[in-house]
Image (cartoon, helix red, strand yellow):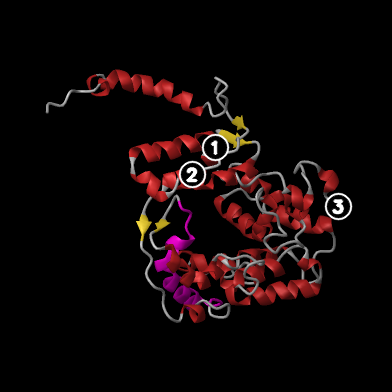
Amino acid sequence: YDHQPTCLETNEVACGEYDTFCEILNFDHNGDGMVQYQEHVEVPLPPSNLREVCEWDELTTIDGYQQCESACNKGKCCYKSIETCQVTNPELCEEYDACAILHVQEVLTVPKPSSNLERLCSADAIVETTGFKACKDACDPGECCREPIETCKVANPDMCDAYEACEILSGNPETHPEAVASQVQLSCTTTNMQTGAGVRECQEACNPGLCCIGGADGKGEKCNFIEYAEWCDQYAGCNLLHHVDDGGFTSNKNAKDAVDTACSDFSAAGIEACKNVCDPAKCCFKLNEGCSESGMGDVKCFHYAPCGHLYVNDQDPNTSTTIHKGVAGQIDFEDENWMGE
C-alpha cells in the first residue's frame, strides 16, 4: 500500500499560516461567534449518561473516546484557564467530573502499604521532620490514590483504602483536627489570637516548626527550604506570630491591619510570607467549599481581605477574589465600610 500524502503534508507551510490565526476560533467558548478577552459561559447540565459514556472501558476505542469527548464539550470552560474562560455557574462544573478521565496522564498499580502505616502517620509522629519524612516515604507508593484523575488513575482502586492514614498529610480541621497543620490553622487565626491566651496557643502549636519561620521573631536562621519544604507547609500559619503582640489583636481593625502589613510586600519573598499568613483563611476564597465545611467556621474572612491579591491571577476556577457567599457575603475588597472596628 502506497501512502498518499495528506493535504497537511503537502501544504505544511501554508497550513501553518492558517493555524497561527484560525486557532483563535477555539477560544469562542460560549459559541456566540465572538472572541472576547474573557468569555463568560453558563455551563448547561451534562447528558444524564455522562458517567457511563466516560467509563474507562468505553475509552479504549476511538468511537468511545469521541463519544465521551463530545458529551464533555459543553463543559469545557470548567477546565480552561480563568483568564480566557469564566464559568458563571461554577457549581455545575462538578457534574462534569467524569470528563477528567479524558486528561489522564498515566495508569498505575498501587502496591500494598507498610504494615505500620497508621503508626508512622499518626498526629504525634509527623510533628518532627524525621517522623514526617517517614510517613511521607511510606505514603509515596500510594500517591496516585490522592492525585486528581487527570494526573493519575489507579488500576486497583480497592488498594487505596489501605492508604487512608496518609490523608492526614492533606486533611483539614474538619476531617483531621488532630493533624499538625489543622492545629496550626485553628490556633493561628486572627480570631483566636484576639487574646493573649490565643497567642500562646498559636506559639505552642508552632514551637516544633519555629525554624520554618525564622524563630519567634522571624530574625533567626530558617530551615533548609528544599529539604524541609513539605514539613514546613504544616506551619505556614505560624508567620502571623511576627505581626501580633503577646496580648493579641485589640480590634478587628488591628487584626486586618496586621494581615495588610504581612501582604504589603510584592516581592517573591513577600508574596510567600503573605501566602503563609493567609493559609488559615484560604477557605474564604473557595467558591465550592465554605469555611464551615473545612472546620474553619470561626475564621473572620474580612480580616483576610488583603489576601485577595493572591487569587487575582489564580488559574483555579474554584477560587475567587470575592469572599465565599456562604461565609461572609459577597464582599468587595475595595469597600472599607465592612471592615469593622
11 vs 191, left or right, is left
Cβ atoms at labels 3 and 2 below 8 Å apart: no
Tell whether position 148 is magenta. Answer: yes
Front-most of residues 153 and 201: 153
The nearer-to-camera label among 3 and 2 is 2
* Residue 27 visible somewhere in the drawing: yes
Report crowding for label 2: few under 14, some 14 to 19, many 20 or more residues within 10 A (C-alpha).
many
Secondary structure at badge 2 equals helix
Report crowding for label 3: few under 14, some 14 to 19, many 20 or more residues within 10 A (C-alpha).
few
Q: Quadrant of the N terminus?
A: top left
Residue type for callout 1? Gly
The disc, 3 or 1, on the residue closer to the chain's N-terminal end is 1
State which region is magenta.
126-149
Front-most of residues 58 and 277: 58
Secondary structure at badge 1 equals helix
List the residue tagged with mark 1: 75
Rendered location of residue 163, percent (x, y): 47, 70
Secondary structure at badge 3 equals loop
Give the dominant element type of the magenta stretch: helix, strand or loop.
helix
Rendered location of residue 102, percent (x, y): 43, 44
Q: Quadrant of the C terminus?
A: bottom right
Query: Residue at position x 80%, y 42% from top?
Result: 335
The disc, 3 or 2, on the residue closer to the chain's N-terminal end is 2
The label on residue 21 is: none
Cβ atoms at labels 1 and 2 below 8 Å apart: yes
Query: Residue at position x 47%, y 27% from top?
Result: 26
Distance CA(mark 3)–CA(mark 2): 44 Å
117 vs 235, left or right, is left
Tell whether position 128 is magenta. Answer: yes
List the residue tagged with mark 3: 340
